[in-house]
Amino acid sequence: MKQEPLFLKPVFHEKIWGGRNLKTDFGYDIPEGKIGECWAISGHPHGVSVVTNGQFAGQNLADLFHDQPILFGHPTGDRFPLLTKILDANGKLSVQVHPADDYAMAHENELGKTECWYVLKAKPGAYLIYGHKAKTKEELEKLIDEEKWNQLLGKLTVKTGDFVYVPSGTIHALTEGIEVLETQQSSDVTYRLYDYDRTDDQGNKRELHLGPAKDVITVPFKLPKLHQKTEQVANSTITTLVTAPDSPYFTVKKLTIFGDLPQTRNEVPFTLCSVVAGDGQITVGDQTYNLKRGTHFILPNNVQTWTWHGKMVVIISYPNEGKY
């Protein structure tokens, strides 16, 4: 089997809060309308990525995960475990929460959804809804029922280059003027608490999910503590943004590449890669591939060594041991 990256075609989703920045900022050929999400690396049935190159061109990632387990380190799970997105928040997202695995599997037949954001762009003063102020479950439910959102919701100011970890059970929302690269478990379960009383083009409000949301919100909210580290390799830097035990499901790293950066697989089953700034190349075996901002691909298990070239920032991720 040839050693080669798996380049992937993104899938785009229209959202009430979306815009056109995925075209202007990344050059994507997006559909008409308010496009809020680019599902860049996905095996989820709501938007499956298709391989665009090499011996597996034209195959979708979900089928490839099942049919060619050797490419993914012989996984024990029945679904591709991670999902990489770019979100363009041209407006406010709903205030929401995601369940953990046990609740999601029991009620939705889905994985839970722990996620994280690398902030690609943020307008001055941009902020997230992040966490809450309730001390007890009773206080939480009372504030929700009385719609006292200013008393309940926490806020976090963000700027370009920030990283935010969002475990399942965390109330959260992007707000206007923010673009993020999101790494998450492969799940599409969202419970909305509040949607600013918005209506769609037909005058309909989006559905809320207050009962399930109350079930899964973690009380009290505790700000995650991340043990991040940065190492210098030649002229490049590798920053570990989150990993086990802080994050049980995935590891996310930021590669700031200047010149040549050789890497070896070690014990990682496969690696998801997203170029978020600059351009360059990657050499795998005897072939070199061009990369630019907005390129997404997987380095499968049979690729043992590779070398980055150029001046660019790449966000990589992989499932942690026992989570694939």
Image (spheres, rainbow, N blue to C red):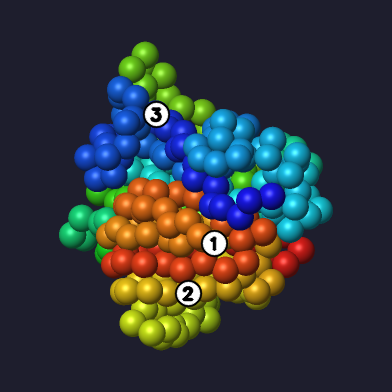
Inspect the image, locate mark 2, and give the three-letter code of the amino acid beneath it.
Pro
| Above or below: residue 245 compared with residue 204 | below
**Residue 292 placed where, x, y %?**
32, 52
Query: CA–CA distance between discs 3 and 1?
Result: 39 Å
Count residues near mark 2 (Cα–Cα under 10 Å), then give few for <14, some for 14-19, many for 20+.
few
Residue, disc 1: 285
Residue 155 in view (yes/no): no
Q: Residue 167 lies in what quarter of the image?
A: bottom right
Nearest to N terminus: mark 1 or mark 2: 2
| Above or below: residue 262 compared with residue 110 | below
Left or right of 195 on screen, residue 21 = left
**Residue 305 placed where, x, y %?**
57, 68
Q: Residue 255 lies in what quarter of the image?
A: bottom left
**Residue 69 placed where, x, y %?**
76, 48
Residue, disc 2: 262
Q: Which mark is residue 162?
A: none
Q: Nearer the observer, disc 3 or disc 1?
A: 1
Spot the residue most to the left: 124
Q: Label 1's element?
A: loop
Q: Name the residue nearer the viewer: 244 or 226.
A: 244
Residue, disc 3: 14
Q: Residue at x 55, y 47 (%)?
A: 6
Q: Name the residue nearer the viewer: 78 or 99.
A: 78
Q: Name the residue nearer the viewer: 289 or 148.
A: 289
Q: Residue 72 lies in what quarter of the image?
A: bottom right
